[in-house]
Image (tube, rainbow, N blue to C red):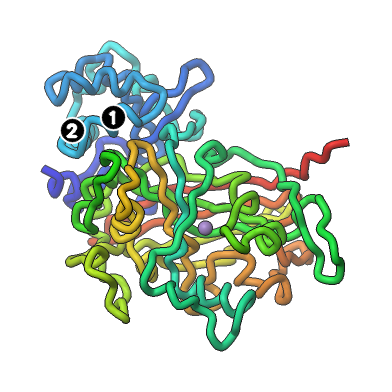
C-alpha cells in the first residue's frame, strides 16, 4: 500500500510542475486557513492544498477510519497523529487515490473544486502541530568541530563525550512558529570582551541554524524507553527547522548548563510535515560511528536520509536572495532514531506533538556550513550581498529562508521552505 503511493509512475490529474516539491508521491500534511476559513488540516499537492476537513465532510474518509472525520476537524494534526501509523498510511493511500490521474471523485462533488483544492498562494500556513516539547540536538560532527575550534581548542575541538552521546538540550515549545512568522531580535545579557560586567542589549550576533525537525506521533509511558529500531514507530514525519541563535548571549550564558535565552526566543519550522513513508526512497547509510556506540544506541539498516538542505539570505531592502549554504542531512553523525533512543533511555516519555531538532547540519566545506557562525567564522569573514553590503551575522530586515528536498528515481520529495524576517529588538523605555 505504502509502496504504491511512492510509485514514480504515479501522476495526478492536477497539474504538478516537474520541479515541484509536492508531487503525488509526497503528500505532506499541514494546517492552513483561507481568508474566510479557520485553521484545518490539508495536504500539499503541486500548487494546491487539499482541504482534508472538507473532504472528510463529504464522507470520503469514513470507510478508511471513522475517527478521521473528527481528526480532520481539529485545528492541528495532533488528533490525526494519535490515530497511529496504520491510519496515517490508510489516509495517505486514500488521498493518493483521490488525486490520481483518472480519478474523478472530487470533481463530481457538489462542493466547488476551488473550495476542496485552494491554491497554495491563496492560503496562510499555520503551525501543523501543537508542539508539546522541543528538544534540540547537536549531532553534526562537522558543526561541533567548527564550533569547538572557535570557542574551545583548535587542536582538540570535540569534547570527550561527543562521539558517545547524542548531545542535546531541552528547548522551548512555546516559541516554535511556522514559516512566515517574523520575530524580534532578542534582548539579552552580553559580556563584551574588553568589559568586566555584562550589559543588557539587543543581540549583535543573531544567527540561524539549518536543521531538520522530527515530529513524534506516538507516545511512550514514563519509565519506558525505546531502541533506535523502536524509535521508528514513534516518528510521524520531518520538517525543516531553523534554530535561531543569539551567539553573544550564548557565549555568556552557556557555561555551566548549556543554552537558555540564546536559543529559546524563536524556532521556525516549515508548514508541511513530510511523512517517513514518503521519505522511504531517500533512506541511506550514515557515517561510520567510531568508537562503537554503547549497545542501547546500536542500530541496523538505513536510518539516515539523503536530503539536500539550503540556506538563502536576502538583505534588508534587497530584491535578490543569495544561497549561503548547500549541505545534506545524510552527513549527520547520530541519526534521529539514536537521538530518541538516547532521550528516552532514562525513562523520559515521548508525547504526541514533540519536536526534535537534528542539530545544525554542516558539511565538510565552507559552502556547506549550516550557520553564520561557521560561514563567516565568527564574523571574521563576512558574506557579501548583491547590494554591496556585508554580513557577519544577521541584520534587522534580513530574510533567511531554508529549503530542502531529495530526489530518487526522478521523483522530487521536498519540504517547501521555512522563511522569516528579523525585526528590530523591542526595547523597553
Ligand atoms: Mn540547534
Residue 68 in the image: state x and y as whole percent: 23, 23
Viewer-side residue, 300 vs 38: 300
Q: Is residue 170 above or below residue 360?
A: above
Using the image, tell me which numbered label, if any, was put on residue 80: 1
The structure residue drawn at horizontal position 60% and vertical position 82%, both measured from the top left corner, is 153
The structure residue drawn at horizontal position 50% and vertical position 16%, both measured from the top left corner, is 36
Residue 350 in the image: state x and y as whole percent: 33, 43
Residue 418 visible? yes
Residue 101 visible? no
Q: Which residue is mark 2?
A: 87
How many numbered marks have been drawn onto this rendered protein structure? 2
Residue 71 in the image: state x and y as whole percent: 29, 23
Which quadrant, please, contains the C terminus? top right
Q: Is residue 342 above or below residue 427?
A: below
Which quadrant, please, contains the N terminus? top left
- Does the beta carbon of the residue at mark 1 sit less than 8 Å from ligand 1? no
Instruction: Verify CB contact (< 8 Å) between mark 2 and mark 1.
Output: yes
Q: Earlier in the sequence, mark 2 or mark 1?
A: 1
Image quadrant assignment for residue 323 = bottom right
Question: Marks 2/1: CA distance?
Answer: 8 Å
Amino acid at each position: 500500500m505504502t509502496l504504491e503511493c511512492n510509485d514514480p509512475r504515479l501522476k495526478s490529474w492536477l497539474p504538478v510542475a516537474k520541479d515541484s516539491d509536492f508531487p503525488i508521491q509526497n503528500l505532506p500534511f499541514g494546517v492552513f486557513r483561507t481568508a474566510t476559513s479557520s485553521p484545518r488540516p490539508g495536504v500539499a499537492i503541486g500548487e494546491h492544498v487539499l482541504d482534508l476537513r472538507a473532504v472528510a465532510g463529504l464522507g470520503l474518509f469514513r470507510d478508511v477510519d471513522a475517527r478521521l472525520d473528527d481528526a480532520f476537524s481539529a485545528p492541528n494534526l495532533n488528533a490525526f497523529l494519535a490515530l497511529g501509523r496504520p491510519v496515517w498510511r490508510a489516509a495517505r493511500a486514500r488521498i493518493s487515490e483521490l488525486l490520481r490521474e483518472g480519478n474523478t471523485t472530487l470533481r463530481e462533488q457538489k462542493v466547488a473544486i476551488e473550495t476542496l483544492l485552494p491554491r497554495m498562494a491563496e492560503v496562510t500556513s499555520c503551525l501543523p502541530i501543537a508542539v508539546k516539547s522541543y528538544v534540540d540536538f547537536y549531532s553534526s560532527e562537522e558543526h561541533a568541530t567548527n564550533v569547538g575550534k572557535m570557542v574551545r581548542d583548535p587542536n582538540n575541538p570535540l569534547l570527550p563525550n561527543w562521539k558517545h552521546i547524542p548531545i542535546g538540550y531541552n528547548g522551548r515549545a512555546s516559541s516554535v512558529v511556522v514559516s512566515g512568522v517574523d520575530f524580534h531580535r532578542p534582548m539579552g545579557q552580553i559580556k563584551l570582551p574588553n568589559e568586566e560586567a555584562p550589559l543588557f542589549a539587543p543581540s549583535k550576533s543573531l544567527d540561524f541554524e539549518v536543521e531538520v525537525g522530527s515530529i513524534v506521533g506516538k507516545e511512550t509511558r514514563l519509565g519506558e524507553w525505546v531502541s533506535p529500531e523502536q524509535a521508528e514507530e514513534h516518528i510521524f514525519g520531518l520538517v525543516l527547522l531553523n534554530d535561531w541563535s543569539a551567539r553573544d548571549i550564548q557565549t555568556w550564558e552557556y557555561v555551566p548548563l548549556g543554552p537558555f535565552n540564546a536559543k529559546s526566543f524563536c524556532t521556525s519550522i516549515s508548514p508541511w510535515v513530510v511523512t517517513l513513508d514518503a521519505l522511504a526512497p531517500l533512506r541511506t547509510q550514515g557515517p561510520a560511528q567510531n568508537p562503537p556506540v554503547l549497545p542501547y544506541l546500536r542500530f541496523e539498516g538505513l536510518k539516515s536520509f539523503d536530503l539536500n538542505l539550503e540556506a538563502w539570505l536576502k538583505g534588508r531592502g534587497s530584491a535578490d536572495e543569495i544561497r549561503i549554504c548547500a549541505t545534506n542531512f545524510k552527513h549527520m553523525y547520530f541519526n534521529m532514531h539514536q537521538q530518541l533512543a538516547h532521550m528516552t533511555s532514562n525513562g523520559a516519555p515521548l508525547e504526541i506533538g514533540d519536536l526534535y531538532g537534528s542539530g545544525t547540519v554542516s558539511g565538510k566545506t565552507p559552502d556547506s556550513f549550516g550557520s553564520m557562525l561557521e560561514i563567516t567564522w565568527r564574523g571574521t569573514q563576512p558574506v557579501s550581498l548583491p547590494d554591496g553590503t556585508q554580513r557577519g551575522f544577521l541584520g534587522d530586515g534580513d530574510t533567511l529562508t531554508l529549503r530542502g528536498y531529495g530526489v530518487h528515481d526522478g521523483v522530487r520529495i521536498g519540504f517547501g521552505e521555512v522563511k522569516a524576517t528579523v525585526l528590530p529588538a523591542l526595547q523597553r523605555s
